[in-house]
Image (tube, grey):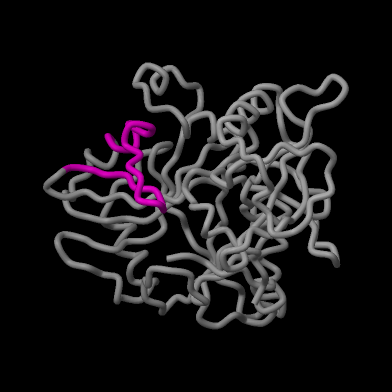
Amino acid sequence: MLATLSDPREFGTADDGWIFERKLDGIRVLAVRDERGVRLLSRTGRRLNATYPEIVAALAAQESADFTVDGEIVAYDHRGRTDFGRLQRRMGLTDPRQVLTSEVAVTYCLFDLLRLDGAEVTALPLRSRKAMLHRALTYHAPLLAFLPDHESDSDSAGGGRELLEQACARGWEGLIAKRAAGRYVPGRSRDWRKLKCVRSQEFVVGGCTEPSGARVGFGSLLLGYYEGERLRYAGKAGTGFDRETLLGLRRRLDELALDRSPFADPVTEPAPRWARPRLVAAVAFTEWTRDGMLRHPRFLGLRDDKQPADVVRESAI
């Protein structure tokens, strides 16, 4: 089940019937445990057991031997904030020796329950599912965590907007508002709403510019999103990279080299290097300009849990 981007001003009253969870900056993972063992599955259905064996072990040690849970795997920085860039250093690892020696500790934050002891519970209200999830598993810090929810104060005029202000002041990504009585329905839903502190979304990488001066790898990534079958150009991101990322990304883009632009719109950058639109990047930005370009985009990391064809321009409802 996926959330829809929404305007925080919608939640400016008592917000009856809504609960609010911390928005995390990690990768969404479904975990299944049954007679075949534990399986960690990404949004695209890719198995992640080899990358997060400690999470697999923690779920395999649970007293309950039959469940399906939904959550997000995150890495925290020294301030207690979820850090997608830090998590990226674990995401590509599958060699057991590399995983065991990685300094990046991860936490699986659980927030929903789909099945328990042979019974599907997706038709139950969210409030009931969360209560069952809290009781069904034992949470071993820091590997497994139960993601609590918050309700806006019915005596406060600020409602969810006030909660969002508090979340932003703590340095959180934002909040997810969910209907307390809602069912679990796969797909994007208005029963789950994203309320962001900083604007961000995924974009498809369609190429890059050449580096200049002391820069290595490339200058900027050329970004776009799909509108039907057309890849619309959204601008370029030239910040948020370290040297290792610049070199590694350039190698991947060279492997995807294309002799013509994948974008439906003209790109005026001098001597661009085109690439097949296979990579998806998470990008933060301040706003969309009137001509449909990103203002002040900043690269956050690559995402391998989303298909390029699913990347569209997000707009608040």
Q: Nearer the viewer, residue 257 or 58?
A: 257
Asked whether residue 239 appears in the rendered view, the answer is no
Residue depicted at x 29% and y 76%: 123
Asked whether residue 200 appears in the rendered view, the answer is yes
Q: Write down the region rendered in magenta.
A: 37-57
Q: Identify the residue at the far left of this view.
A: 35
Residue depicted at x 11% and y 47%: 35
**Is residue 133 found left or right of 212 in the rendered image?**
left
Q: Nearer the viewer, residue 85 or 58?
A: 85
Magenta region includes residue 54: yes
How many numbered badges does the structure rendering display? 0
Q: Position of residue 12 (x, y in %)?
A: 69, 78
Q: Nearer the viewer, residue 314 or 6?
A: 314
Quadrant occupied by the C terminus:
bottom right
**Is residue 51 found left or right of 160 in the rendered image?**
left
Q: Position of residue 152 (x, y in %)?
A: 60, 72
Q: Is residue 153 above or below residue 144?
A: below
Residue depicted at x 33% and y 71%: 128
Q: Position of residue 58 (x, y in %)?
A: 29, 37
Q: Is residue 43 above or below residue 114?
A: above
Magenta region includes residue 18: no
**Is residue 149 found left or right of 235 in the rendered image?**
left
Q: Is residue 108 above or below residue 154?
A: above
Quadrant occupied by the N terminus:
bottom left
> Which of the 4 image quarters holds residue 164?
bottom right
Q: Position of residue 49 (x, y in %)?
A: 31, 36
Q: Nearer the viewer, residue 102 or 275?
A: 275
Q: Identify the residue at the far right of this view.
A: 213
> Which of the 4 image quarters holds residue 94?
top left
Residue depicted at x 47% and y 31%: 92
